[in-house]
Image (cartoon, rainbow, N blue to C red):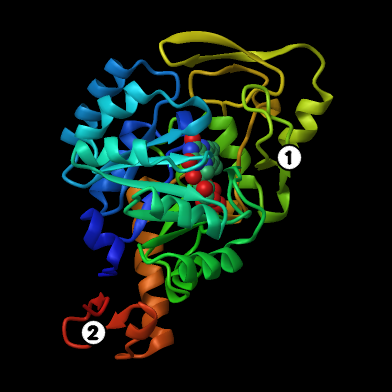
Amino acid sequence: MLETAFTRLVGCSVPIQQAGMGGAATPKLAAAVADAGGLGMVNMVMVPADDVAVAVAALAKSTTGPVGINFLMPFLDVAAVEAAAPHCRVVEFFYGDPQAGLVERVHTAGSLADWQVGSADEAKAAVQAGCDFVVAQGTEAGGHIRGTVGLLALLDEVLDAVEVPVLAAGGIGSPRAMAAALAAGAAGVRVGTRFVATAESGSHPAYIQALVEASAADTVITMAFSGMWPDAPHRALRSAVAAVEAFEGETVGEMDLGPARMTIPKGATPSPTKDTTGAIPAMALYAGESVGNVVQVQSAGEVVRELAEGAERLLRAWYGSRISLADQGHLDVAGESGAFVEPS
Ligand SMILES: Cc1cc2nc3c(=O)[nH]c(=O)nc-3n(C[C@H](O)[C@H](O)[C@H](O)COP(=O)(O)O)c2cc1C
């Protein structure tokens, strides 16, 4: 019922993008989000291009909704981009200067391209590179943080800077937060931490339990897990930072990474997945300020519905039955159909 420029562009029925999140964002999670009406995403760092193609083709067939793949620029494999793009509705990039050549490759395959950005200048560069939409990531976000500004201030700047649809990311874990982002002019929200604590996520149960027990004040921006990815601040549970600092020894455990089983050095970047063994509390337990909204393990579909239906209820209550915010590119509450639609 929440129709926006993003849902129309991408072809989903709910303005929610699930963040591509390393081992947490399994194809099963992406498919469940897409089935529930959102945009489901995967991220396959260190997976060979041929295997990426097979996996995303299978993912696309497993759901009727749109799916996408996220690429981290410091680990970019252009062959994997080319292999994945024909099978995905969206190909997305993060943590590097926007590149027109990459966007062109995505468009040539018939897919949409987007960039997650941390500043208005980066948003402009993404649009100049040809991106179809951008994600504004505030510093409330879990995982790696691109910019230095909180979400609402950033969203304000990015919305003024670009014409394409803008998603809001960082700390959005409740209907209230989602409604606020939409009311501020975002065409949708990108949600990470909430989806880590789902039945379909690939994350280790002890990591998920730590999220359930934590609140927003229990997260911190740190460099503690820079092992494979230097110079990139990230938000994680404070308890994980304390545990890794106290950890004696070079190796915290083992996990499957791409096709190989690898030992995990102390302070390494990957977050623990179901197959990970070792000192889980001392690994990269990424969490956004949205972690306070993680109170139990749910299905991904339940999370999508909770956020979308709750946000819609709040927007209806706030705006009344028929208020057009067309001038600002906001939602129009259409009285007769009962649906929120953006004015054409
Ligand atoms: C466990 C975890 C892993 C993440 N990995 C990635 C990633 O691989 N690529 C990416 O673009 N963003 C990644 N992010 C950041 C998300 O894209 C997004 O900005 C963030 O989750 C939004 O904040 P939230 O967690 O409060 O919802 C990750 C976030 C988390 C929590």
Q: Secondary structure at mark 2?
A: loop
Q: Residues within 10 Å of mark 1 (few under 14, many from 20)?
A: some
Identity, as a three-letter code, of the amino acid under mark 1: Thr
Q: Residues within 10 Å of mark 2 (few under 14, many from 20)?
A: some
Residue sitting at x 24%, y 80%: 343
Q: Is residue 234 above or below residue 340?
A: above
What is the x, y in percent for residue 122? 52, 52
Q: Quadrant of residue 56?
A: top left
Identity, as a three-letter code, of the amino acid under mark 2: Ala
Q: CA distance from mark 2 to mark 1?
A: 45 Å
The residue beneath circle 2 is: 334
What is the x, y in percent for residue 30? 32, 40
Q: Quadrant of residue 145?
A: top right
Who is closer to the viewer here, 205 or 201? 201
The residue beneath circle 1 is: 222
Q: Is residue 37 above or below residue 264?
A: below
Q: Tell me if the residue at label 1 has its CB under 8 Å from ligand 1.
A: no
What is the x, y in percent for residue 197? 49, 42
Residue sitting at x 51%, y 57%: 173
Horizontal placement of 149 versus 243: left or right? left
